[in-house]
Image: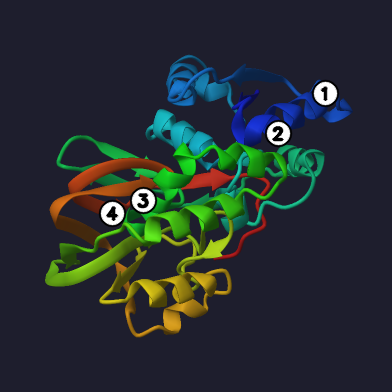
Amino acid sequence: MFIFIVNPIAGNGRAFKIFRKIEKSKLYNKITSRHYLTEYPGHAEEIVKQIVLEKKSAIKAIIIIGGDGTVHEVINGMGDANIPISFIAGGSGNDFGRGCRIKGSPLTILKKIVMDKKGLPYWKGNYDIDQDNQRNFINSIGFGFDAEIAEQANQSSYKNILNTLRLGTLSYVIALIQVLFKFKPFQAEIVIDGNKQMIKDCWMVTIANHQYYGGGMKIIPTAKIQSRVLPVLIIHGISKWKILGLFITVFTGKHVMFKEVNIYEAETFSIKTNHTITLQVDGQTDSCYYCMIAKNSQDIQIKGSVFHY
């Protein structure tokens, strides 16, 4: 059985339209399937927890039609269940699909999913905020400037309008300008594989599973899908005008040439700040002063993907 998790409001309704088109296809009507429409934030996670308990052995794959936030909820609902997943992009950023190179029309992707017998491995990340409870991230987790950009974009009135026009990435560009002039750098204690360092005048710290975030920005261009290793990007000691120039180059990945940008690779990573700061996890925002991060040792299988690692 194939399970479809559909977020009907993702992409300002685009995900729902995609599912309705799939539902009318010959292929969809040939396969054994069941679909669920999410109704509120966190609902996808609740749905998946329940179906894993009831139908785990019968599920061939969980197919997500929505955005990166929906993928985040599904992954956290699955826990350690060894169930393949796939993604048909219907959100505004869709960086998970971009990072995994899931390409083609929705029906083409569905055909690949059904024909793909095994899938390819993907390693999610674990994070623990303020020593509360461990959760998973699928794309990236970021602290500081980029997180405040995500929060500004998520709360804006223009995001839905731009999503309708399929210009969702522009919402992050507008939000960047808005955040730039009010953002205040912070001080952070960073521990990478047991090695501690203090970062003064820190603008942002980002950990990523693949290159992309913010709807196609190549935030860590060297990042690749792999086990154990977490690429880490730190930006510090930079002027407001220079960071604007930096973000102009982030779509090409040339920002890593700035001397204020450092990239590391870590198996374990923690950050402690001098005050509570904003963080983003797969585009959803929260706040913290301490966070531990590591790579999950168990992989999940991605069906319909063509990525190489």
- The residue singled out by tag 3 in the image is 148
Which badge, 3 or 2, comes first in the chain's sequence?
A: 2
User: In the structure shown, which secondary structural element does the residue marked by tag 3 occupy?
Assistant: helix
Find the residue positioned furthest to the front. 181
Instruction: State the quadrant of the N terminus.
Output: top right
CA gap, disc 4 and disc 2: 34 Å
According to the picture, the residue beneath numbered tag 1 turns out to be 30
For disc 4, the marked residue is 294
Q: Is residue 225 left or right of residue 130?
A: right
CB atoms of marks 4 and 2 within 8 Å: no
Amino acid bearing label 4: Ala
Is 2 above or below relative to 206?
above
Residue found at the very far right of the displayed protein: 26
Quarter holding residue 50: top left
Q: Residues within 10 Å of mark 4 (few under 14, many from 20)?
A: many
Amino acid bearing label 1 = Lys
Residue 280 in the image: state x and y as whole percent.
Answer: 37, 47
Label 1: element kind: helix
